[in-house]
Image (tube, rainbow, N blue to C red):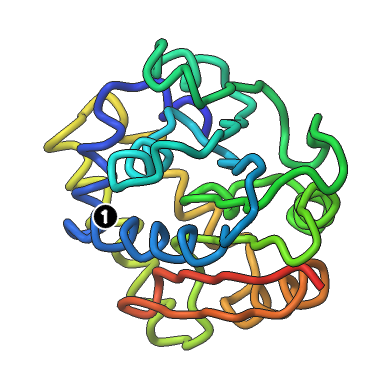
Amino acid sequence: MNKVFAYSNYELVNTVITLFQLRRLRYWAFQEIVSSIGNCGGYLLDLGAGDGSMTRFVIRNGLRHRPVILLDPAINGLKSMGDQYSEIIDKVVGVSEYLPIRRGSICAVYTSFALRQFSNKPMALLEVRRVLRRDGSFIVLEFWRPDNPLTYAILLFYLVFVLPLLVSIVAPREVWDYATMRITVRDIGGISWLRRLIRELIGNIVSYRTYLGIFLLIRAVKT
């Protein structure tokens, strides 16, 4: 995961492999972020931020006055942002399972296409709960393993055969990095498992939607 964030083709490749739905999916997540912050004046946290693509989208769509922490274990991705939006952005190298952030200090945590690849998802969610303020929100935009066996079979076919072909066209040097997506999908529970985990470790799910049966957006509120 961390290697691909350093590449200049990251945005193009992800636009292609999401079947040109990346902007739509990010806008859905942006709406949930806006809905979640309310009167909270503290920091937002972009968890597994990579090259900061999601945060750039959030800022460009209007949230230009909110301080944001970009956290990722890969320094190259964070460095690729340079000094862009440096007046509101702090970049932190760290892992989701052990956040170097004070308890109860974050208004909202959002993660975009990163949770699937966290090594210890329950521990990461417990850390999210720890750093969130009371009634703070956790927003997940993700590409996830579907519960339906037929949809899962179609997804595996896409990941094994179609996705490498698409990546080979737009970014041939990065085929292997994206090919590993099938491993991350194979090794996780289904969407229902993820929803149950978030309810148990974060709190009430107040918003949930899917697209094509594999893309999901969840917002949970700390209780």
In this rendering, position of residue 176 left or right of residue 134: left
Residue 180 location (% of width, % of height):
46, 44
Identified at 76% across, 67% down, the residue is 222
Of residue 172 and residue 204, the one placed in the foreground of this image is 204
Residue sitting at the far front:
39
Asked which quadrant contains residue 37, the reply is: bottom right
Is 93 above or below relative to 21? above
Asked which quadrant contains residue 30, the reply is: bottom left
Identified at 82% across, 68% down, the residue is 201
Q: In which quarter of the image is the C terminus?
A: bottom right
In this rendering, position of residue 121 left or right of residue 220: right
Q: What residue does disc 1 label? A: 22
Residue 43 location (% of width, % of height):
64, 40
Q: Is mark 1 on a helix, strand or loop?
A: helix
Residue 197 location (% of width, % of height):
75, 72
Instruction: Please name the amino acid that badge 1 sits on.
Output: Leu
In this rendering, position of residue 1 left or right of residue 109: left
Give the number of marks.
1
Asked which quadrant contains residue 211, the reply is: bottom left
Identified at 26% across, 36% down, the residue is 11
Identified at 18% across, 47% down, the residue is 166
Is 195 above or below relative to 184? below
Residue 220 location (% of width, % of height):
65, 71
Of residue 121 and residue 86, the one placed in the foreground of this image is 86
